[in-house]
Image: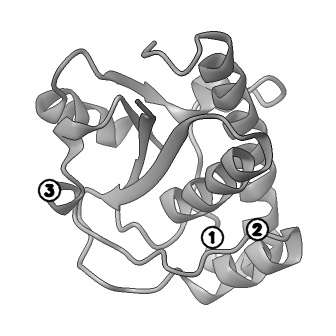
Amino acid sequence: MSTSVLFVCSLNVCRSVAAHGVFRYILRETGLDAVADSAGVAAGAGAPPEMRVQRAADMRGYDLSGICSKPLAAASPAGHDYLVAMDASQLPVLRECRANGAAVCLLMDYSGYFSETEVAVPPEHEGVEGCLQMFDRIEDACLGLWRALNERGGARG
């Protein structure tokens, strides 16, 4: 049975979408039996990723096609093994909706390189460059999450 990871941020058009795309790529490349999804605690349904996020993803070789914003409730958070927040503001909501021993954590808990505890939203004025810096952090932490899942054979943390 696949391990299911849900990445969560506020609007599900920037940070969690990027993490979803990065982790989906890692899973495809490594064959780990897991699935990725994303949602937002205050998201509407069906919005595409921000254009600057899409451009940064394209520059890094990540395919975000098929990823659209969705509210947390629509992502059925209780059905996931890992509920992974981009910042601490999502943690209380995720703790309330978890079920069956799901792990609730911050993505940056898995970072091996960066000292930040949260994935910050890149300021608008930073454009694509700010998103590329965000991707640096997300890539590092997603690789750490992948290592943790791989070491546990996909089991919950």
Q: Are marks 3 and 2 in contact (CB under 8 Å)?
A: no
Q: Please, is residue 6 above or below residue 10 in the view?
A: above
Q: CA distance from mark 3 to mark 1?
A: 27 Å
The residue labelled by disc 3 is 73
Percent x, y for residue 34? 52, 38
Q: Earlier in the sequence, mark 3 or mark 2?
A: 3
Percent x, y for residue 87? 45, 41
Q: Residue 147's image quarter?
A: top right
Count up the numbered dots: 3
For the N terminus, the image quarter is top left
Q: Residue at x 12, y 30 (%)?
A: 96
Q: Which mark is residue 18?
A: none
Q: Are marks 2 and 1 in contact (CB under 8 Å)?
A: yes
Q: Which mark is residue 130?
A: 2
Q: Secondary structure at mark 3?
A: helix
Could you classify mark 2 by the number of other residues whose Cα lies within 10 Å: few (under 14), some (14-19), or many (20 or more)? Answer: some
The structure's colour scheme is one colour
Q: Earlier in the sequence, mark 3 or mark 1?
A: 3
Q: Residue furthest front?
A: 1
Q: Nearer the viewer, residue 128 or 8?
A: 8
Q: Residue at x 67, y 81 (%)?
A: 54
The residue labelled by disc 1 is 123
Q: Residue at x 21, y 31 (%)?
A: 92
Q: Nearer the viewer, residue 20 or 53?
A: 20
Residue type, label 2 = Gly
Q: Residue 108's image quarter?
A: top right
Q: Residue 2's image quarter?
A: top left
Q: Nearer the viewer, residue 81 or 132?
A: 81
